[in-house]
Image (cartoon, helix red, strand yellow):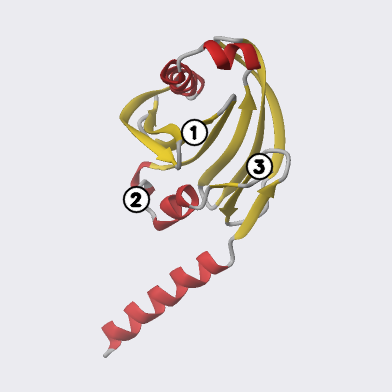
Amino acid sequence: MPRLLAITLALLAASCGSRDWVEIRSKEGRFAIKMPAAPTPSTRAVDTGAGPIALRLELLAHRGFDYMVGYSDYPAEFAASADPAAILDGARDGAAARLPGTVLEERAISLGEHRGRSITLQDASAERIVQLRLLLVGRRLYQFGVATPLRDRSAAEVEQFLDSFALLQN
């Protein structure tokens, strides 16, 4: 009986944590995602194959996890002539260089008709894992991911965050 009680309490604690998450909606970014608390907005310039572009971010450090969701818009003429796979490759390589880290896993993903990548990176210290998703929607590149201690890479919060991303209609 005590074991059943412990399992029940653990399940209740896990479900309570996920109910407390807040949905972050970006009208300008045209996306929604769930996070355990409200993030802090930030904008930074990143160098790309199209030159420097603004990366608009929402950042949250929470209980040892670092959550990030953001987007950047490539110039229309660049996006129209560039190979989508090359854009995704460049975003992957840029993320690995900024971490700095090593790509451990990569696979193609899609959201509806939009192509993307799911990437797992390990930082240079080999103590943290970054699970990142890239999604190309027209000329907009979405990036959302979470960095965790190596031991927490399979935590339920990781998939809960990554799977909650949704595109919004104009």
Name the residue furthest bottom: 1
Q: How many marks?
A: 3
In the image, residue 160 sits, relative to residue 167, either above or below, namely below
Q: Position of residue 34 (x, y in %)?
A: 57, 54
Which quadrant holds the N terminus?
Answer: bottom left
- Left or right of 137? Residue 170 is right
Element under disc 2: loop
Could you tell me if the residues under marks 2 and 1 are in contact, i.e. CB atoms within 8 Å?
Answer: no
Q: Position of residue 64 (x, y in %)?
A: 51, 48
Could you tell me if the residues under marks 3 and 1 are in contact, i.e. CB atoms within 8 Å?
Answer: no
Q: What whole-number distance in Å separates the C-alpha atoms at marks 2 and 1?
A: 22 Å
User: How packed is label 1: few (under 14 Cα within 10 Å), some, or many (20 or more)?
Assistant: many
Which sits in the foreground, 12 or 163? 163
User: How packed is label 3: few (under 14 Cα within 10 Å), some, or many (20 or more)?
Assistant: few
User: How packed is label 2: few (under 14 Cα within 10 Å), some, or many (20 or more)?
Assistant: few
Say what amino acid the circle numbered 1 marks. Answer: Leu
Q: Which residue is mark 1?
A: 135
Which sits in the foreground, 60 or 126? 60
Say what amino acid the circle numbered 2 marks. Answer: Ser
In the image, residue 146 sits, relative to residue 92, either above or below, namely below
Which residue shows up at 29% across the image and 87% down it?
A: 2
In the image, residue 124 sits, relative to residue 2, either above or below, namely above
